[in-house]
Image (cartoon, rainbow, N blue to C red):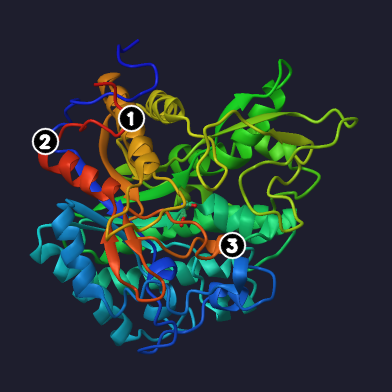
């Protein structure tokens, strides 16, 4: 047990010289310019135009207008002292119909971004897929269709050949859990399908896309880049003293459905058993698991909060507080009898509980499961209802959240976890998917009317952390 404050509000803890401090965004959430320079439509362009899908009917048409404000945003990153920037590439900018010829104007945007980062001494961490599937591929069946994984490999090869001399780290997929289970199971995310079978087929084809994508990148990249995938783990707590089975089921669907094939070359037997009434898994073809199980240099870990579960007894009203917008379907194929129980606060504006101990536990647990595999926190952060007052944003809660989670990461390091870096979500306030612009995660505030950027207090606090390499006092630290 490492000593420290029980509430994780430690300060002065130093990070190793090689630890990479950065921040993250995603294409559809910030870029805007949805129909410029040859970009094709994505499933999020379609979905956000469907009535009732997104709060206030918001879309990513303009978002933060990052596409046109690239230089300003690069300068912001430099002012914050970022050492890395994790961004995603919009597949429909590179291949507007999802396959076939490459749109060089789309490539030029990311080329300028990568050059701008390198010129400022910031390492580019490029994610190939953060949910903006080209609409024509969805029209052909989307992720439940095997062919989508092959199209992804073509796209990976095309962009790898063009940026592969300059990108420091490649990430194939961001949070395939969301793409599969929210996109095709619950229907809360694009394309809004509600089918357990489709969700599980999507799981497999996303896993396959990861494996084929890593191989495609490796075949064309000319520098000694690193390769990774980013998963959003569910850190589970028991909702009562009979919760073991509920925890095991959700762990299988949420976590091991991805770590199993990617890192061990197999699907967990209990996952196949739990879902056997939903699908026979015949979409897994001979040889697929070898294709998926590719060596990677680190695993990206996204963490925001914990989840408390128990088995529904069929008598009390069923709770479904799983932290995502309810769109009618289930994100848990074959395990719908699991209840997600309301957790103790404090909460962020998403209603997610603040639990830095969950991050420490997750990092230690992953290290124990995969001792040879380095880890990186590729997302962590919080939404709060920020106000601009006299040109400043005093986001005490977000700074406090970050201080506690950096403390958790430091404790994991002390416990022997090979943790390579931390990318705060998010650099800018942005389009928070089904919640539109109502949830602000940025360490930089964006005024959606004027598009003016204002560094929040949390951004200044993070800049000090990066400059000193030690956790600064937070607004709620005991002095
Ligand atoms: O905004 C998202 C991001 O796109 C993926 N991870 C979680 C974030 C907050 O919900």
Identify the residue under disc 1: 476
- Quick one: quadrant of the N terminus? top left
Dot 3: element: helix
Name the residue located 36 percent from the left edge and 55 percent from the top edge. 442
Name the spot of residue 476 as percent of width and height, x first: 33, 30
Say left or right for 47 vs 174: right
The residue sitting at 39% across, 86% down in the picture is: 101
User: Dots 3 and 2: beta carbons under 8 Å?
Assistant: no
| Residue 282 image position (x, y, % from top left) | 69, 53
For label 2, the crowd category at 10 Å Cα-Cα, with few meaning under 14, some 14 to 19 and many 20 or more, is few
Q: Nearer the viewer, residue 280 or 210?
A: 210
The answer for how far apart the CA atoms under marks 1 and 3 are is 32 Å
Residue that badge 2 annotates: 17
Q: Is residue 55 above or below residue 260?
A: below
- Above or below for 68 versus 440: below
Instruction: For label 3, count other residues whose C-alpha is less than 10 Å away and answer few (under 14), some (14-19) or many (20+).
Output: many
280 left or right, relative to 77: right
Look at mark 3 in the image and give the residue it sits on: 434
Separation of marks 1 and 2 at Cα, in angstroms:
27 Å
Q: Against 105, is 446 above or below?
A: above
At mark 1, the secondary structure is loop
Quadrant housing residue 220: bottom left
């Amino acid at each position: 047990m490492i000593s420290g404050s029980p509430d994780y509000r430690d300060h002065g803890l130093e990070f190793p010289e090689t630890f990479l401090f950065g921040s993250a965004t995603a294409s559809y959430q910030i870029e805007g310019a949805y129909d410029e320079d040859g970009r094709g439509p994505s499933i999020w362009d379609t979905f956000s135009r469907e009535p009732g899908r997104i709060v206030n009917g918001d879309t990513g048409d303009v978002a933060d207008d990052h596409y046109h404000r690239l230089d300003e945003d690069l300068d912001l990153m430099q002012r914050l002292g970022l050492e890395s920037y994790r961004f995603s590439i919009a597949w429909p900018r590179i291949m507007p119909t999802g396959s076939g010829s490459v749109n060089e104007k789309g490539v030029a945007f990311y080329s300028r971004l990568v050059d701008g980062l390198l010129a400022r001494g910031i390492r580019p961490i490029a994610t190939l897929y953060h949910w903006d599937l080209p609409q024509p591929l969805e029209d052909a069946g989307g992720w439940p269709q095997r062919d989508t994984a092959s199209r992804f490999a073509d796209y990976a090869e095309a962009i790898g050949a063009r940026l592969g001399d300059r990108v420091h780290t490649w990430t194939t997929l961001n949070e395939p859990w969301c793409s599969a289970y929210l996109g095709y199971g619950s229907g809360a995310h694009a394309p809004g399908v509600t089918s357990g079978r489709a969700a599980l087929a999507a799981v497999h084809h996303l896993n396959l896309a990861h494996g084929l994508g890593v191989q495609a990148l490796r075949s064309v990249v000319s520098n000694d880049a690193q390769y990774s995938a980013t998963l959003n783990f569910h850190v589970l707590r028991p909702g009562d003293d009979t919760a073991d089975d509920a925890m095991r089921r959700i762990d299988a669907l949420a976590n091991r459905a991805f770590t199993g094939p990617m890192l061990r070359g197999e699907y967990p037997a209990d996952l196949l058993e739990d879902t056997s009434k939903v699908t026979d898994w015949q979409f897994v073809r001979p040889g697929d698991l070898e294709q998926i199980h590719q060596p990677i240099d680190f695993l990206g870990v996204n963490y925001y909060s914990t989840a408390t579960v128990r088995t529904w007894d069929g008598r009390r009203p069923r709770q479904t507080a799983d932290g995502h917008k309810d769109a009618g379907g289930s994100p848990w194929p074959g395990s719908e009898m699991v209840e997600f129980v309301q957790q103790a606060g404090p909460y962020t504006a998403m209603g997610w509980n603040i639990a830095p101990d969950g991050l420490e536990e997750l990092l230690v647990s992953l290290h124990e499961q995969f001792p040879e595999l380095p880890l990186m926190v590729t997302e962590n952060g919080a939404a709060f209802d920020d106000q601009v007052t006299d040109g400043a944003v005093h986001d005490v809660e977000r700074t406090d959240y970050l201080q506690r989670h950096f403390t958790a990461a430091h404790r994991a390091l002390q416990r022997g976890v090979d943790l390579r870096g931390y990318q705060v979500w998010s650099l800018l306030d942005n389009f928070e998917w089904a919640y539109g612009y109502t949830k602000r995660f940025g360490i930089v505030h964006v005024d959606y009317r004027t598009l003016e950027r204002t560094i929040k207090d949390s951004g200044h606090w993070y800049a000090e952390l990066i400059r000193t390499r030690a956790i600064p006092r937070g607004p709620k630290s005991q002095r």
